[in-house]
Amino acid sequence: MTGERTARAVWSHLVEPGDPVGHLDGGAQEALELLRSGGLDGDLATHAARWKLRLEGLDEDVLAGRFDRDLRFLIPDDEDWPKSLADLGTLQPIGLWMRGGASILSWPSVSIVGARAATSYGQSAASEMAGDLAATHVLVSGGAFGIDAAVHRATLARHGRTVVVLAGGIDRVYPAAHRELVEAIVVSGGAVVSEMPPGATPARHRFLSRNRLIAALGQATVVVEAGVRSGALSTARHAAEIGRDVAAVPGPITSAASAGTNQLLRDFGICVTGAQDVRELLGTIGPDTLPRVVETAYDRLGERDRRVWNALTPRVVGSLTGIAREAGLSAHETATSLSFLQSIGLARSIADRWIRVAV
């Protein structure tokens, strides 16, 4: 990594979202040297003491900019850096840790968020909207249970691209039950991003800060279902603060799960009931506006999953044992891989036996 990139990567370990990072305007390397020498004083003195304590605890790999080769660290000078983040002003992140396709962060996009404890009504509305929008927009959400998961899964089902914005490190997927979902998103051409470095825990305050990134990455934010204290409402507030359109799906007045969305309708007055409403809001009514991607899902598979896919046949169903033997893997490894391949549409189960789906 370059000196500036390495310095920013180090800074991502030192600061918390919301810390004053205007000191990086003169260059992350210079600011790091000032921190080491005690040159950050005045209004930054308290923060400098915290940052220096973390700096002293970093290992040599972090300080040298060495990290997992599957990760990428984007900085504002990069061509793939999403320019929409500049709308956050002083709250723009120092950098973004990510896996997946960086270019899609600048494609036409919509952020869709909502309640974790979603009702069947909310999940159905989110799935239908995201599935339809997947042809024309990247769908951005937070990877949580409920509405977020419905958005991500519906996009995958329609072979679209979706972005997960995490509150902790890329290696700390939360909830842990969604590790396979996140992996499927990356393999299918989507992305997972975080401003927090690898190893960072998804603490409560980081979820609230993370919401500003979800808001900034989308051209508009749609809240499908949310209670009056839902974190989805903080995403909506961030979106409104940076000039994004905020829309909501109306819900039953008797449902506590829709109290927050109905409040948004009173505050902002933008009601959407489907994908076409969202497209009209953004002025993108025409179909197929996303760039075409030649790379297939198979091209993004890891070695284990490629071996299993190649062990399958398109016309004859195979048993788990036979597939494992052909792939040279254990039954457990093969079963895990088959489940994953099925989730991204590359394998199909028929009466507990398996068949290949062409890419």
Image (tube, rainbow, N blue to C red):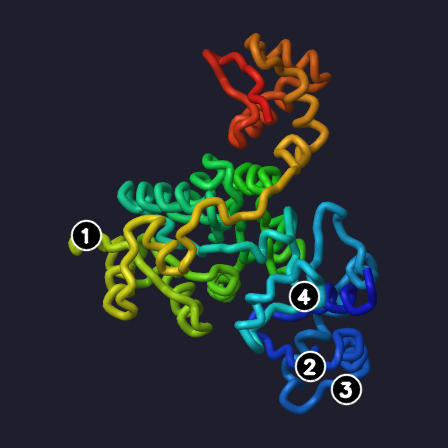
Element on which disc 1 rests = loop
Q: Nearer the viewer, residue 150 or 356?
A: 356
Determine which residue is flagged by label 4.
12
Q: Residues within 10 Å of mark 2 (few under 14, many from 20)?
A: some
Residue type indicated by callout 2:
His
Q: Amino acid at mark 4?
A: Ser
For marks 3 and 2, give the CA distance: 11 Å
Up-down: is 21 above or below 338? below
Q: Secondary structure at mark 4?
A: helix
Please, which residue is most extreme toward the bottom here? 42
Please name whichever residue, 42 or 118, is drawn nearer the observer in this view of the structure: 118
Q: Is residue 186 above or below residue 340?
A: below
2 and 4 marks in contact (CB < 8 Å):
no
Amino acid tagged 3: Gly
Q: Position of residue 94 (x, y in %)?
A: 65, 69
Q: Nearer the viewer, mark 3 or mark 2?
A: 2
Q: Which mark is residue 39?
A: 3
Using the numbered discs, state the Cα–Cα distance from disc 4 to disc 1 in whole angstroms. Answer: 43 Å
Seen as rendered, the residue at the extreme left is 254
Q: CA distance from mark 4 to mark 3?
A: 19 Å
Residue at 60% from the left image edge and 54% from the top image edge: 193
Q: Earlier in the sequence, mark 1 or mark 2?
A: 2
Q: Residues within 10 Å of mark 3 (few under 14, many from 20)?
A: some
Label 4 or label 3, whichever comes before in sequence order: 4
Image disc number at residue 23: 2
Q: Is residue 59 above or below residue 181?
A: below
- Disc 1: which residue: 252
